[in-house]
Amino acid sequence: MPAKSVPIIPSTLVLYQRERSAVWQLRMKLADGKWHRTSTRVHDVDEAKERALDIYYEARAKQRANLPPTSRRFSSIAEMAIRQMEEELAADRGKSVYHSYITALRNVLVPYFGRMRVDSITNDTMAEFEQWRRELWDKMPAASTVTTHNSALKRVFDIAVQQGWATPTTLPTLTNKGKKSNVRPTFSLPEYRRLVQRLRHWSKNGRTERTRQMRELLRDYVLILANTGMRHGTEALNLKWKHIEWYVDLRREQYLQFTVSGKTGGRQLIAKHQVARYLQRIKDRFDDLACYTLDELLDKRVDEYVFRLRDGTRTQNLHQSFEQFLRDADLLYGTTSDKARTLYSLRHFYATMELYRGRNIHQLAVQMGTSVGMLEQHYSKLTPMLLAEQFAGTRSEKDIAAAR
């Protein structure tokens, strides 16, 4: 609450000081009927009165010209946006991608835009920022990085508009001129079969007990990712036994249903039938779980992580073990991309195989927790290969064409 206040225009224009601050703040009611607050940035009350009147009449003139009457520095609005996202994440209502937005704001956007008034950021300002970013990183950023920056900027701009510190017409148009990524690295079906076969033997060896535990867990982790389309990381590693259940359809057929939470929030997905075998194998490594059947374990809704080492600890290093395995198996690189394969390549393999089997792209988008546009962007180039038989025609058609 204000420590003291000085009315200048009754019920319209008031100066006040906050506790523990000698700077005079200004509260004014404008034609929109709302109270607007800003700082006079001065300590002397007489000087503050003059400054307050200047700000008030300037704000009224801006309103008549359909401009924001007051503005804020980008840094202060960015902090509001960060607090909102952190509160939503703490309440389990936020999306995982908020972490990327917060990092982008703190590490890139606030360092550049921080001292600027948000209503002063124009298309020219954005062009200058893009040049600064390229020089800072000594390269053109990836299109996905630019998308993250734009999304974080939009959250700041949205707050500015809501609070009356900017208008949509004064804000810049956000564009994406980032470097397009190459085709996402995946596995062909023969390569995946070779991966499964070699992983079976590789997982049984290791110099130390810790290495053997990592390898046996990695085997089941890989197989479950490839047969569910789950995202490696937050979605998979945070999976608990209580998040898995049997879904029974109208025909009384049952299917394994996973409830996962990650980049796009929470969703349910249906696993391939063979995943039950992999879960059974994981369950049997633990004495306190091996006494139950898989059905009994799922019914108990056990609040324990699925992907743990045999000694009960969790690990964040499965991606490193997978990279080492791919090197040993000569599978780190493929022919369709110059990028090294990672655990995310198993998700791309899942999508490719589902499209090959004729899965509806809208259904697949729901299963994988992504957008139709994203699937079309990354997998449309594969369509001729996935439908090679239809495009090539039948053997009889080939014989007829040769006879002509």
Image: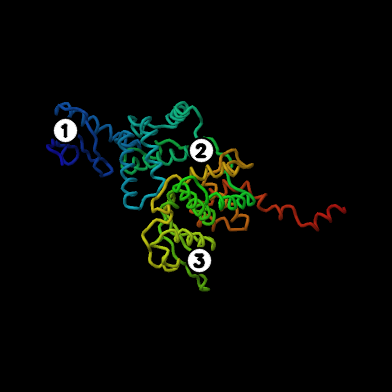
Q: Taking 368 as reference, is 149 above or below it?
A: above
Residue 21: assigned label: 1
Q: Please, what is the three-letter code of the amino acid marked with disc 1? A: Ser
CA gap, disc 1 and disc 2: 45 Å
Q: Amino acid at mark 2?
A: Ala
* Secondary structure under the numbered disc 1 in the rendered image: loop
Place of residue 383 in the rendered image (x, y in percent of width and height, measured from the top left) = 64, 50
Q: What percent of the width, then of the height, locates residue 257?
A: 47, 62
Is residue 71 at least partly visible in the picture? no
Q: Quadrant of residue 153?
A: top left
Helix, strand or loop at label 3? It is: strand
Q: Which residue is mark 2?
A: 143
First-in-chain label (3 vs 1): 1
Viewer-proximal residue among 341 and 163: 341
Q: Amino acid at mark 3?
A: Tyr
Residue 24: x and y in percent read 18, 32
Residue in the image at 63% along x and 52% along y: 189
Label 2 residue SS: helix
Mark 1 or 2, nearer chain start: 1
- What x and y, as percent, mark residue 51? 21, 28
Mark closer to the observer (3, 1): 3
Residue drawn at (38%, 66%) of the image: 300
Q: Which residue is mark 3?
A: 255
**How many neighbours does mark 2 have within 10 angstroms: few (below 14), some (14-19), or many (20 or more)?**
some
